[in-house]
Amino acid sequence: MTKLVRQFRLSKGGGLLTTSEESQEQQRVDHVARQIGKRIDKTTADYDAAHQELRNVLKNYSENTSVNWFEVDDRIETSAELQQQRALVSRLTENQNIIEDQLDTFKELQKSPYFGRIDIQDPQEAHPESLYIGTASFVDDDQNFLVYDWRAPISSIYYNGVLGKVAYSTPVGDQQTELLKKRQFLIQNGQIESMFDTNETVGDEMLQHALGEQNDETMQNIVATIQREQNDIIRDTRSDLLVVQGVAGSGKTSAILQRIAFLLYHSRRDLEADQIVLFSPNRLFSHYISDVLPSLGERNMRQVTLAEFLTQRFQGLNVQTQFERYEADQQTPVNLPVRKFQESATMMTAIADYCQHIAPTDLKFTDIRFQSRVFFDKETIRDIYARFPAATAPADRLLRTKNALEKRLKHRIADEAKADWVRDEIDQLSDEDYHNLLGEKHLGKFEQLDDEIDFIAREIVRRRFRPVDDAIYNGYFLDTYSQYTAFMAQCPLPDDVSADAWQQVVANYQHDIEFHRLALTDAAPLLYLRDLLAGGGANHRMQHLFVDEMQDYSMAQLIYLQHAFPRAKLTLLGDSEQALFKAVESPAAILKKLDSALNVKRSRLITLRRSYRSTLPITTFAKALLPDGDQIEAFNRPGDLPKVVIRYDEPAAFKALAHEVQLELATNGTVAILTKSNAEAKRVYQELHPQVDLTRLTDTDRSLPKGVVVLPIYLAKGLEFDSVIAYNVSADNYPDDQLTGTLYTIASRAMHHLTLLCIGPASPLIASDKIPQADLQIEHEFQN
Ligand SMILES: Nc1ncnc2c1ncn2[C@@H]1O[C@H](COP(=O)(O)OP(=O)(O)OP(=O)(O)O)[C@@H](O)[C@H]1O
C-alpha cells in the first residue's frame, strides 16, 4: 500500500496546518482509539458470555434429541420441548452474531476512527462544535458522540457544503447551521498519515491517494471521498425511479452500494437487506462488490444476474443469456427492426391488452391427464373459467378455476376411496405405513375405526392423484407457450416489420420451445403474458430494485422487472456509451422513455460526467473514441500513455503479447487480456498458457484471481484491473464504429496501464484524427 507522506499544507479554503494542530489531532485519535479499545474489551467479554450460553443450550439440545420416541405422548411432549429449544438456539445465535458484528465494527474503527471533521456554529449555541465523521458512530460511556456515522443527517454537510451558511435535512425538518471548517484525515492503524483543511466537497488529495492504490480483488468502500453528485444518488430517498447515467468509472456501482448502506441505516426498522435486490451484470461482479457493505457494517443485499433470474422463472427451459446472444449476434446478422419491436414497451403494452381482453374460447387450455387418460378435459376447464365474471382479471379467473378444480378433485378422491383397490391396499399396509399415513395430527382423533379407515383410504387416493393436484396447483392446464404463439399471430406489427419476418420469429420461437430453449428476446414478453394470465410472478416484499449496467436491458425487460417487483423503488444505473448490445442513447431520451413506460410518480435523472477509475492519459484516449466524448471529465491522475503494439502475423503478435504480459505483471497486481469474444479468449489462452501463468474466465466463474486473466469484455463489465491489454484491436477485428462501445468499455476497465495489441494495421477507431499520435506510445508505425 502506498502511503502519503505526512503533509501540512495551505489548502484552498483553509489555513496553514501547524505541527501543534497535528499533534492535538493525533492526541484525539489516541483518545478515541483508547475508548474504542475499552469497548472492544467489554464487547469481547459479552461475546464470550453469549458464546458460552449458546454452547450450554446446544449441549442440552443434543442430549434431548436422543430421547425415547416410543410412546406417543412422549413423542408429542418431546417435540414441543424441542421446538422451544430450537427457538432458544436461534435467538442466542442471533444475539451472538450481533455482538460479533459489533466487535468487527469496533475493531475496524479503532484502526481508522474517522476521516473527516466539521466545525459548525449552530445559531442557538454560544460556541462552535467540532464533529468527527467515520464509517460508524461511536458514543462513549458518557454519551459523547466521539464519531458520527457518515450517514447521519449532519454528516451530509461534510459531503455537500462549502464553508458558510448551510442546511441539512433531518427527520424533523431542515436545519440551518454555519460550516466553519472542513478537515480531512487519512488515518491508518491509529496514526494520522495525512490531514488538511479544504473548502471543496472532498479535496482531490484524498481522491488521488484512494485512486492511486492497486486494485484489490474486491471493491472498497468510498465513504471517505464521496463526491457531491454521488452523494445526491446515495442520499435520494424521494424518487420512485432514480436513473443514473454516468460515464465509465464515474462511481455508479460505488454509489449503488453506499446508497444501499444509507437506506439500510435510515430505515432500520422497516427495511432489511434481503428486501433489496441488485441485478448485476455477471457473477464475477457479484463477488467483486461483496465486501463493500460488510466493510460498512451492513449485510449484503440480494444479488442476481438476469440469466439466473430467468433460469429460475423458466425451470426446464434453457434461456439464452445476454452473452450467448452477443456471441450469436457476431455470427448471424440481426433483423434490427424486429428485435427493436420485440424489446419495446409497445410489445409489452400489446401483451397487456391481449391478456386483458382475451375470451375464454381463445385460451389454450389443455386436458389434465393422469395415467394416460384424461382426468379433466379442456372443455370442462374452459366452461368453469367462462363462468366467472368477464370483468375479472384473467389471473383471478384462473385462480377461481383452480379452486373449482380442486373441489372437483376432492369429490373424485372421495368416490375413488371406495374402490376395491384401495381397500386391498389398506390390508397390505404395515403398521408403520399405516401410522405414517395417519400422521401425527390425526393420532387418536377418530372415535370410530371406520372413520379412521375412510381417512386412510382418502389419503391413499390423494397421494395417488398427487400429479393431478400438482397440475391444478401449477396451472399446467393452460399452455402459456402456445398462448404466446397465438398472441404473436395476431400482434399488430409496426411498419418496419414485415409479415414474413414476423412469421420467421414465430417459427423460430416454436422451434426453440420444441427443444426446450428460449431466445432472450422472448423471455420478458413470455413471462409477462404468463403472469398476467396465470397470476403469480410478483414479489411484493422487495422494497428496492437496483439494476446496474441498465444499457444492457431492453425496455421490455425493465417493464417486466417492475411488474415482478411491484412495490420496489427503482434505481437504474448505466452508461449508454458502453452498450455492447445496442445503440447509444442520450440520458434525457432514456429517462423520457422510462418515464412513460414505467409510469412512476417521482422520477429523477442524475448524470455523472467525471471519470475516476483510469489515469488521465487512459481516460483521454478512451473519451476520444466516442463521438461526444468531450463531455467526459477526466480525473487528473498522472500515468503512462496507452501503448499500441502492432505486429503483422499471429506468431509475432503472441510473442509480443507474452512479453507485454510479463512486463505489466512486474508492476501490476492484476493484468487482464480483454477480448471481443469467448473464442478469442480461448485462443489467447491456448497460445499463451504454456509460457505464461494465466487464468481464463468464463461466465460460470465467481471470483477474480490475482495475476493474469483472459476474458471476453462482456464478462468484464463493471470490473476494473490495474493493467488491461486489449487483444487484437486491428482494422480487421474492429473495422467500424459498430465496435466503438466495445473498445471504449475495454479501454475504460484499465486503472493504471492500457496496452492495445493489433495483429495487422490498427483499427480506424484508434488510427483516427481524433486521437493525436502524441497521446499514444506506438511500438510500430501505422501502415494504414
Ligand atoms: N468518490 C470516490 N472516491 C474514491 N474512489 C472512487 C470514487 N468514485 C469512484 N471511485 C473509484 O472509481 C472506480 C470506478 O467506480 P465504479 O466501478 O463505481 O464506476 P462505474 O461508474 O460503475 O464504472 P463502469 O460503468 O465503468 O463499470 C472504482 O475503483 C471506485 O472505487
Image (cartoon, rainbow, N blue to C red):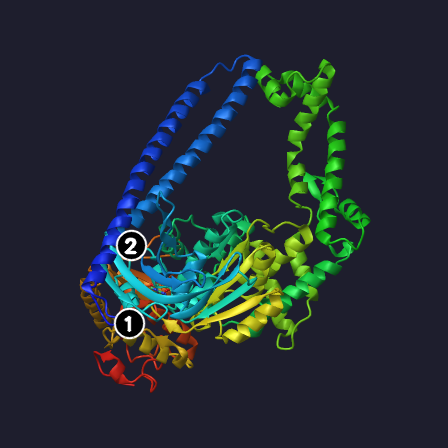
Instruction: Work out which quarter of the rendered image holds the N terminus and state it.
Output: bottom left
Asked if residue 366 is positioned above or below residue 599 in the image, the reply reads above
Earlier residue among tags 1 and 2: 1
Which of the image's four quarters has the C terminus? bottom left
Q: Nearer the viewer, mark 1 or mark 2?
A: 1
Q: Is residue 155 visible?
A: yes
Residue 615 has which mark? 1
Front position in the image: 187 or 734: 187
For mark 2, does the 10 Å Cα neighbourhood hold few (<14), some (14 to 19), or many (20 or more) residues? some
The amino acid beneath tag 1 is Thr
Q: Where is residue 491 in the image (x, y as percent from the top left)?
A: 68, 67
As helix, strand or loop, the secondary structure at mark 2 comes to loop
Residue pictured at 40% horizontal, 54% vertical: 286
Alpha-carbon distance for marks 1 and 2?
Answer: 23 Å
Three-letter code for the amino acid on which mark 2 is drawn = Pro
Q: Nearer the viewer, residue 407 or 603?
A: 603
Q: Give me the residue at 76% from left, 32% from top.
A: 411
Element type where label 1 sits in the image: loop
Q: Is residue 537 left or right of residue 155?
A: right
On the image, the x and y values in percent for residue 63 come to 42, 19
Q: What residue is shown with label 2?
A: 705
Asked where in the image residue 193 lies, by quadrant, the reply is: bottom left
- Quarter, ligand 1: bottom left
Relative to 427, residue 163 above or below? below
